[in-house]
Structure formats: C-alpha cells, structure tokens
Image (cartoon, rainbow, N blue to C red):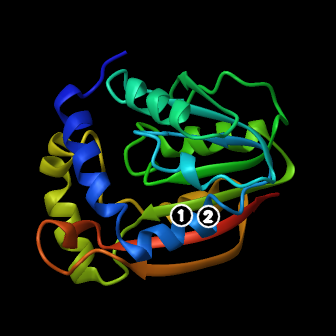
C-alpha cells in the first residue's frame, strides 16, 4: 500500500507542536476522552489520540493506511497504558464485523481519505445501532471567499499534505452518510495566516448512527 514517507516524518514534527496547544488538548480530551466501550479509531496517524482514552474504554482498534505512519502509531500505543491494537487498513475497507463498536473516533482524518462516503459507510456498518461517531475535523469555509481560496489551493495542498483536501464539507457528508449530530460546533484553533488559514475552520461534534 502506497504511503508518504516524507510527509509522515514532517507530520509528526508538526503535530507535536500543534498538540501542545491548550485548545487542541481540550478538544481531544472532549472527543477522545468521551469514548466508551469498544472503540474504532480511523486514521490513527502517529497516535496523537492514544493518551486521551479513559477508563470507560474496554479496547481500541485503531487503523492506519500509511505504512510510514504505522510504526509511529504502534510505538505510541506501546508507550501508553491503554488497550490499543493498531492495524494496517484504510477507513474505506475496515477489517471488522458489522455492529462491533460502541464508539468511533475520527480526528483530522476525513480530509485525506480517498472516499469519504465509503469510509463513513464502513464506520456506520461496524458501529452498533445507536453508536457514537466523535469527530474533530477541519472543514470547508462557510463564506464563499474562504471556500474559493480552499478550492484554489486544494490541488497543491493534496500533493504537499499527504492527500488532504482542505475544501471538503465534512459535516454535511457525515449527515448524508446516515448520522445525526447530537452536538456540533465550529472552532478555529489555527491562526488566520498562511498556510494554516486554509485549514482553519474545524468542527467538533458527536453524531449518532441512525
């Protein structure tokens, strides 16, 4: 499976800086710390979410498609005292049975999956009825001006950012996939300066499989 060797190394350094932000830590505590039961985490990346899982989690099945991210995630899983297993798989082809998980976690992932609709369909399939999808994702600007610049930068950003699409309307895609948001809010944790201005709007949300 194709990966992004240089991006994996760059992303780890970048995320280490971002994860020190009090705002990002608070969001991870809310989204990841609120997980319950058997948990699916898609696109685990370098394992930034792993330290935030709480005592209400019985086990975590984390998947990561990039072979250059995978060793970093597995190393992080070994470093935290949590029941986490990391597998090599894309979100679009989850190696799990139907109705397996109580909670699914998606943090900064749905921008870069090759097929968001298929990935969300797979998440819904493997969640138990009434299971939660807890997300922290950057999304399309609500303003036409901001969205224009996201559309313009997307081809170059995908190449540079390991397949990331800054212009995806991920909130709408989640509802179209058969989830209902119990809560969702828009946040802007990144500074309004290039290059982070292109991925500045994020949603923090909890949705239920319906």
Secondary element at tag 2: helix
Quick one: quadrant of the N terminus? top left
In the rendered view, would you say 19 is above or below 203?
Answer: above
Residue appearing at x 46%, y 61% in the figure: 137
Residue topped by disc 2: 31
- Report if the CB atoms under discs 2 and 1 are less than 8 Å apart: yes
Specify the label residue 108 is tagged with. Answer: none
Residue 185, located in which quarter of the rendered image? bottom right
Q: Residue 187, relative to residue 43: is it above or below? A: below
Q: Position of residue 52 (x, y in %)?
A: 59, 55
Identify the element where label 1 is drawn: helix
- Residue 121 or 6: which is nearer the viewer? 6
Left or right of 118: which side holds 40?
right
Q: Position of residue 42 (x, y in %)?
A: 56, 40
Q: Residue at x 35, y 71 (%)?
A: 21
Which disc number belongs to residue 28?
1
**Percent coordinates x, y for residue 177 in the rendering:** 65, 53
Residue 145 appears left or right of 50: left
Horizontal side of residue 157 vs 101, given as left or right: left
């Amino acid at each position: 499976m194709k990966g992004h060797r240089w991006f994996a190394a760059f992303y780890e350094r970048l995320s280490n800086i971002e994860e020190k932000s009090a705002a990002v830590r608070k969001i991870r505590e809310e989204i990841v710390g609120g997980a319950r039961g058997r948990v699916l985490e898609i696109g685990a990346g370098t394992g930034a979410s792993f330290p935030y899982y709480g005592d209400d989690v019985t086990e975590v099945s984390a998947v990561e498609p990039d072979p250059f991210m995978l060793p970093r995630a597995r190393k992080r899983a070994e470093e935290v005292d949590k029941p986490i297993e990391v597998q090599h798989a894309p979100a679009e082809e989850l190696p799990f049975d139907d109705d397996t998980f109580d909670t699914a976690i998606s943090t900064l992932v749905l921008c870069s999956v090759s097929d968001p609709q298929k990935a969300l369909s797979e998440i819904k399939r493997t969640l138990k009825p009434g299971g939660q999808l807890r997300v922290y994702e950057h999304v399309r600007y609500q303003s036409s001006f901001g969205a224009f610049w996201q559309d313009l930068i997307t081809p170059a950003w995908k190449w540079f950012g390991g397949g990331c699409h800054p212009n995806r309307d991920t909130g709408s895609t989640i509802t179209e996939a058969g989830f209902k948001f119990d809560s969702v809010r828009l946040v802007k944790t990144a500074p309004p300066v290039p290059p982070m201005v292109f991925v500045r709007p994020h949603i923090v949300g909890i949705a239920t499989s319906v």
